[in-house]
Amino acid sequence: MQIDQLILDKYRLLEYLNSGGFSSVFRAREEMTNREVAIKALAKTAYPSSRMKFLLTEFQAMSRIWGHPNIVSIHTVEPGKDDYVAWIVMEFVKGKSLHELMEEGALGLTDTLNIGLDICRGLKAAHAHKIMHRDIKPQNILLTPEKQAKVADFSIARIFGETTEFAETMAGTRRYMSPEQTYGAYDFRADLYSTALILYEAVTGRFPFSGENKEMDKKKAVGEIEEIERCPEVLRNFLQKSLHRHLSERHQSATEMYNELDRIRQDEYIKQASELIDASANSSGRKLVEALERYRKMFRLSLEDAERINQNLFFQRRQKEEGDKREKLLTQVEKHYTLAIDYAETENYPSALTELQKASRLCINDHGLLRIIDNLFGKLNTVSVPLSTNPTVEEVISLIRKLSDSDRMDLRTWLEHQKLVPEETTDITPIQPQVKAAGSYRHLIEEASPEYLLEQVHSDVQYPHEEEALRIFQKIQISEQLGHPRQWLSLYNKLGKFYQKQAGNFLKKNDIELGANCYTRARFAYTVAEKHRLARSNAKKGADYYTLLAHQFELQRSWEEAGKCYILAAFNHGYANMLSKVEECHRMATFCYFNAAESAHLNNELQTAYDIYLLILSIGEKMSVPTKLVSEAQKLMSEIPVVS
């Protein structure tokens, strides 16, 4: 056969590649399709009638596992002529063999892991069809330009039947044989031993057993692996197990070997991705995403596996940051408390209160609460140390002088009242209680953004279905941090679908409250996902079920709960632009809240009554025509004494 020769009238030989004991291999072009192929020409002299069974074995083996990405595929077998018994037309792999790559030097850990995983995938497929390769060696591992490994040359493969489990004929390349393969009675596990040998050689640049054939066989039999410290630490246990002298201590299947290599690969990705995430605190999200994607491709991880790992790493970093902040906060709080105790022991009470105020401010993030705390400590700092058990007149006078004008007025009223009551009378009419103003009612009801509302509802998981919703929401937060707007919108859409489905499930169980809640949350998620038609549809359903729930609370005379449901119904109707229903829900809400406020007023629960009256006024401002109950609430509220 000569270069540029056309054989079988359709294959043109382009390049001689290599030859073995039984065949020569050429690169060729299929003229009709312009496809590059590899052609293995089998010499008649190498295949007398006694050896034809080996040829048929290879054909049968390859036909069973045709098309696997990690096995060199046979396209067809053409009958030979002249000096050749057959031509095997195969997939042409453009890259080098593993043997050629190893001659350039030791491989890195990542390449070694990826090649090992590819070999195991190919062996899993072969072994599943009862095919044992028997000649796994670097020359029979072909690599694409992307270093994807493909197992080649099944010419001495052994196909096990239904009743046979072991091979006895010594076959293969002795250097890469397992100990049992040398002495007979071996099975699929011999292929795994050979795989471990070439992985050790690939990553270290040397063979694990030195010496000539017999000396090498002896070292394999006793498991004397040489210079294991040359291996990366993460591979040592794997290789010591894979090359163990006892067959029962090794990996028992290609799947088991693959799984351990995959675990090592994921551990290495986690290690490197974690370092990258920790080092990128001040860099842009886009750069981090690009770097993580490079690592993913380098380790050949699936998108699903990489995203799962990345999410865990982000949460771990967030937990660590929150833990560090908490530790720092606790240290600062403890410092202030220690100083407060020291000041109290020396009777320096103003300084003690100041330290307590600092400690309280550290623990509160809400600005409204901070103002309350500052006002409270401000007042406490104006008050002297409490009177002793038997105070003197001077101590009492000193305390009275420090009272505010309103407190002095209350004291004067009480003293005058004491003069009018006979000494023997103990039934004293109490002073009319006063309530604190809650501020402008215009700010009591505020419509926050749907993103903020979803963040709030997921901050406290109370039901099992909320755990799955929280996982979706956490992915949303991560995609937002990484700057993935499309993924962010897609996940909000997924969250909307989840809550919409849960709403239907709860209504089947007649749980109206959870059904209405889920429809409302679906509305929030769809709104952010810009699925406005779905958002309006879920808003309408949420409003209808909140209205139904309000009716049930009315029958139970749970007026405040009924009022809340009418407000939520109005909130959803408003989003759906159903203004007449919004007006009706506000009217019913004022009715229910007025009943609740009136009941509290009659029971002298003035603070509760005042707060509900204020809520009614806020609802009234949203109505085009406020009901009479709104003006009645304003009138009754004005009768309640209020302190500023």
Image (spheres, rainbow, N blue to C red):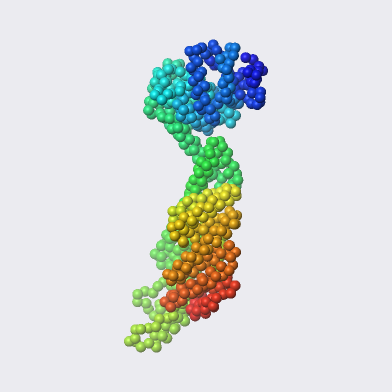
Q: In which quadrant is the N terminus drawn? A: top right
What residue sits 56% from the left and 48% below the top? 479
- Relative to 147, 393 lies left or right: left
The location of residue 179, given as percent across then percent down, is: 41, 21
Give the total of numbered labels: 0
Residue at far left of view: 424
373 to 308, vertically: above or below = below
354 to 591, vertically: above or below = above
What residue sits 53% from the left and 15% below the top? 22
- Closer to the camera in the image, 437 or 597: 597
The location of residue 53, given as percent across then percent down, is: 48, 17
54 to 606, vertically: above or below = above
- Relative to 346, 45 lies left or right: right
Q: Is residue 516 visible?
A: yes
- Closer to the camera in the image, 160 or 635: 160
What residue sits 55% from the left and 26% below the top? 73
- Closer to the camera in the image, 484 or 362: 484
The location of residue 627, given as percent across then percent down, is: 55, 76
The location of residue 188, given as percent across then percent down, is: 43, 25
- Closer to the camera in the image, 436 or 114: 114
Q: Is residue 230 visible?
A: no
What residue sits 54% from the left and 49% below the top? 478
